[in-house]
């Protein structure tokens, strides 16, 4: 499969390496595809990796991962071109964080809306699935914890798209909690704030959520 990674930060880099590890081809999209961080990632990622503009990556990918900072997400999708993503599964790994000096992050979108629903409105022809936003990027691929494999919460309006993303999560070593339609992102995105606040208070980012079952 050809995978577009829209965003070149830690989330995009680690998920890109995860897809390459499964044998997929990955093109990372960025406003500056020739910048140092991407060159270093390409050297690490090997021959199945390439880089280009947001538009080039979106056109290349059969599946796309949205891994931008929230403040730049709308512009990144405009540069990617909604037509390039029409009919494709788009994994939304963003968190709509708002920052104020001296305060913990809050949600810039919440309540009766979510970032994932906003992304779906920006990409009306795509199949948006929320996932990979409730854990530090260092643990997104093959997470290893003493309590066993953690769970990834996901949601999306298209069942076949959710099933595809669930298979990807399992291939990456996760259990899966499918919460159904995209409105469930209104619950999943605040869960990221629980993760972030606990990590900031304890100084420990090395943990993940798991739903215990009988």
Image: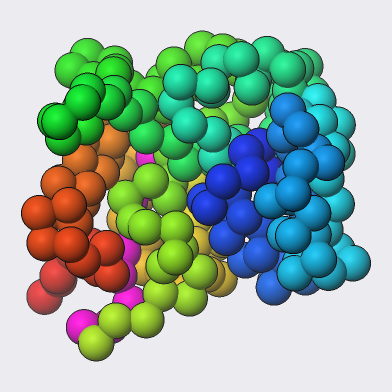
**Location of residue 7 with respect to 207 vertically, above or below:** above
Looking at the rendered structure, the number of numbered marks drawn on it comes to 0
Q: What are the residue bounds of the magenta stretch?
A: 147-156
Residue at the image position 32 percent from the left and 50 percent from the top = 134
Front-lying residue, 21 or 169: 21
In magenta segment, residue 119: no
Q: Based on the displayed image, in which of its 4 quarters is residue 24 positioned?
A: bottom right
Q: Position of residue 81 (x, y in %)?
A: 75, 17
Closer-to-camera residue (59/159)? 59
Residue placed at 53% from the left, 52% from the top? 10
Residue 204 location, quadrant = bottom left
Extreme bottom residue here? 146
Q: In which quarter of the image is the C terminus?
A: bottom left
The residue that appears at 29% across and 18% down in the rendered structure is: 109
Instruction: Characterize the magenta stretch by its predominant secondary structure.
Output: strand
Q: Quadrant of residue 113?
A: top left
Q: Position of residue 7 (x, y in %)?
A: 62, 38
Is 169 left or right of 37, judged from the image as shown? Answer: left
Q: Residue 178: x percent and y percent?
A: 35, 50
- Coordinates of residue 106 in the picture (x, y in percent): 20, 27
At 62% across and 55% down in the image, what residue appears?
Answer: 13
* Residue 161 in view here: no
């Amino acid at each position: 499969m050809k995978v577009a990674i829209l965003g070149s930060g830690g989330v995009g880099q680690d998920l890109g390496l995860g897809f390459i590890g499964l044998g997929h081809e990955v093109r990372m999209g960025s406003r500056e595809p020739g910048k140092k961080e991407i060159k270093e990632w390409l050297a690490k990622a090997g021959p199945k990796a390439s880089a280009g503009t947001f538009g080039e990556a979106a056109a290349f990918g059969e599946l796309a991962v949205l891994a931008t900072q929230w403040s730049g997400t709308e512009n990144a999708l405009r540069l990617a071109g909604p037509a390039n993503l029409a009919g494709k599964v788009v994994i939304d790994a963003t968190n709509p964080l708002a920052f104020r000096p001296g305060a913990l992050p809050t949600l810039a979108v919440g309540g009766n809306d979510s970032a994932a629903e906003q992304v779906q409105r920006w990409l009306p022809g795509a199949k948006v699935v929320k996932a990979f936003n409730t854990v530090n990027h260092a643990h997104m691929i093959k997470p290893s914890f003493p309590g066993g494999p953690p769970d990834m919460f996901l949601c999306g309006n298209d069942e076949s798209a959710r099933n595809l993303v669930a298979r990807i999560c399992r291939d990456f070593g996760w259990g899966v909690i499918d919460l159904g339609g995209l409105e469930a992102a209104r619950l999943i995105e605040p869960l990221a704030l629980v993760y972030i606040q606990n990590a900031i208070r304890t100084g420990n980012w090395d943990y993940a959520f798991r739903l215990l079952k009988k």
